[in-house]
Amino acid sequence: MGAEKDGPTEPAAEAAAAAGPQEKLSLNILEAVKTSQQQNGLRHRDYQRYRQYCTRRLRRLRKNKRVDFKLAGKNPREAFQGRELTAEDCTDERFLQLALVNAERAWGYAMQLKDENQRDGEEPRKRLHLVRRLAKATRWSAKLRELCHEVADDRTTLEAEAYAAWMQGNLLLEKEWWKDAYLEFEKARNVYEQLSSIVEPELRELMQERIEDIEPALRYCKYNLSREEGPGKSQDALKQLQIEAEGSDLLQAKIKKVIEENRKIQAEQASTVSWRGHQVPVRSPALRVKLLEIRDQLSALEEAKNAAGGDGGDGDDLEAAFLETLSVCDDTLRLAREEKSKPSKASSSSTANPEKIAEEYDYIRAYIKTQKLLISIDRNMLYASKMLREMDGQKTTVKPQDLVHIYDQSLQSVHDILDLLGPDAEQHSAEEDVVSAPEMRVQEGICTAFRTLLIGRTYQAQAKWAQAVALFEHNFTRITETRAMDGVTTSQLKQLDDVERKTRAAKCLALAHAFRARLGGSTASQAVPQLSGSATDDAPVLCELPPSIDAVPAHPILFDLASSELRIGKLPKGSKAAKSTSASASANVSSSKDLASVSTQDSTQDGEAGGEDGEEGSGWLSSARNWFGRSGGR
């Protein structure tokens, strides 16, 4: 380490000179950057881990002895002098990687500071440090571009141009030099578009992703350039830009800051809310900003509903929009409660009446609660409408009684709004109010009609046709009364038409089941013949279904179960009965091998057998003779 290294040795220089023109280097800059980022923390926005990886990567590159350093003195740490990287030293692509990794390390450090500044609050010193790190990343990217112009091929040179322009645009964007930043981003986009038409498919996809990241930055610069014409003309462009800039963390922070500034400007102009005919002043600037945020979220919710088809659809974006809007309402309610407690702690020099201020905050809280309840009703109605369509199409296992609970919640929300409006809401109302009492009573009738329909379907599922028909008849009356109310909107008329159509269909089905039950209480299996002959009225029934059961005669089967129980007697040897029995058995062996077939011809000799054996033999021979006599008769 103490020895001084002035560069490549003379033999190495002579060998390089003898080798002739140096071959052009090649490096896939964007592929190398994206691979390193995805494998080392940026997939989870961990910029600190990524810059630490870049530091280790630089150490590994420098330890390959292809990059030399000048060292002087006994203590190398005190006498270190970095060597300038020149084109003459670039004999390998790792020299280009040295400049690239230096730029990535500085950029990663800048993004880490940006995250910390967003999380912990804006700190001027951190922002200055952030700008310095971005400037260092820009210098190294410019150095990479310079080296590629000297030693790299044309494709690598173009990619280095685009990378340097993109890094320079990030620095100018942070400095809020909108015009210069726009020019740099435009240059980077044009180069990437040209390269994407000549590179491999894998690199083409990466370049398309980088182009998509650059597009929101270009629109953001154009938005800031157009702000001089007035905030109204650029507001829609800012909303669209916020949606499309999700891939750029640096740009997202800028857009969020601009949105907050616009809300503060609008909050100064919109300082009142309308509640029950009163224009209630909003004294707190923070509360005005939150009320404007509710308005923006309601606009985003309407856009999500239109994108989902206006009837709930099946996307998760609409549910996320509902939850986000409800969350903003909760935050605003909490802030209003905190602001209400501040006047009581104010000094006695305040000219405002504390009781009047408290009443104003009560009105504001009632206004916010009403907004939240309306959003909840809208969400429940959309969800229930979607489940009803799936239930009619038999695409879900949801039962009618499950949906009754949803309409119960909607009815409770309607009653809460009516309580907030008060019994004399018609006398104290204005067109600017968020909702009116007649409109809520119409909504109450709609929720009740859907709830009655579902209860009737529950009775249908239990085969209680009379109760179901009675509920459906009652529902027609309720729908007619609701349609005749004042303040019915177009969307509410569509809901009433929908529930009336569903009620009519359910009533027809219940009447059909009740009529069939009155015909004799036939079961499903007994109704098959009637259904089979319904094609033509005069067609005869060919057969009964299910067929009747009748006895079928079968051939008798005889089993000789007594032969194993017969006791065979013993005859004395040499007797005439034994000889005649043996002869008779051999003659009839083909017809029967049973021992009971011994000679039916010698019946007279059986009685001559004397003694005990003769008596036993005469008994079973007599039985066998009788049995064979019957068999022979058959």
Image (cartoon, rainbow, N blue to C red):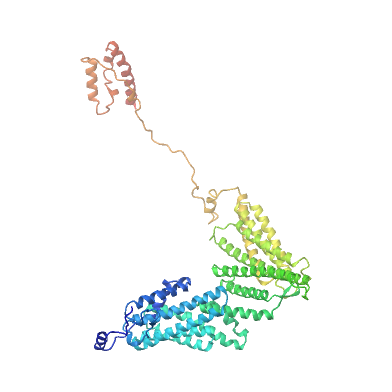
* Residue 132 drawn at (x, y percent): 49, 82
The quarter in which the C terminus is drawn is top left
The quarter in which the N terminus is drawn is bottom left
Residue 58 visible here: yes
* Residue 205 drawn at (x, y percent): 41, 77
Q: In which quadrant of the rendered view does residue 331 lie?
A: bottom right
In depth, the one of 560 and 193 nearer the eye is 193
* Residue 222 drawn at (x, y percent): 54, 86
Q: In which quadrant of the rendered view does residue 357 lie?
A: bottom right
In depth, the one of 105 and 327 nearer the eye is 105
Does residue 414 appear left or right of residue 623 in this picture? Answer: right
User: As drawn, which residue projects farthest toward the top?
Assistant: 611
Instruction: Name the residue: 46% across, 81% down.
Output: 211
Q: In which quadrant of the rendered view does residue 607 lie?
A: top left
What is the count of numbered marks? Answer: 0
Residue 166 visible here: no
In depth, the one of 70 and 382 nearer the eye is 70
Does residue 322 appear left or right of residue 57 in this picture? Answer: right
Does residue 279 appear left or right of residue 604 in this picture? Answer: right
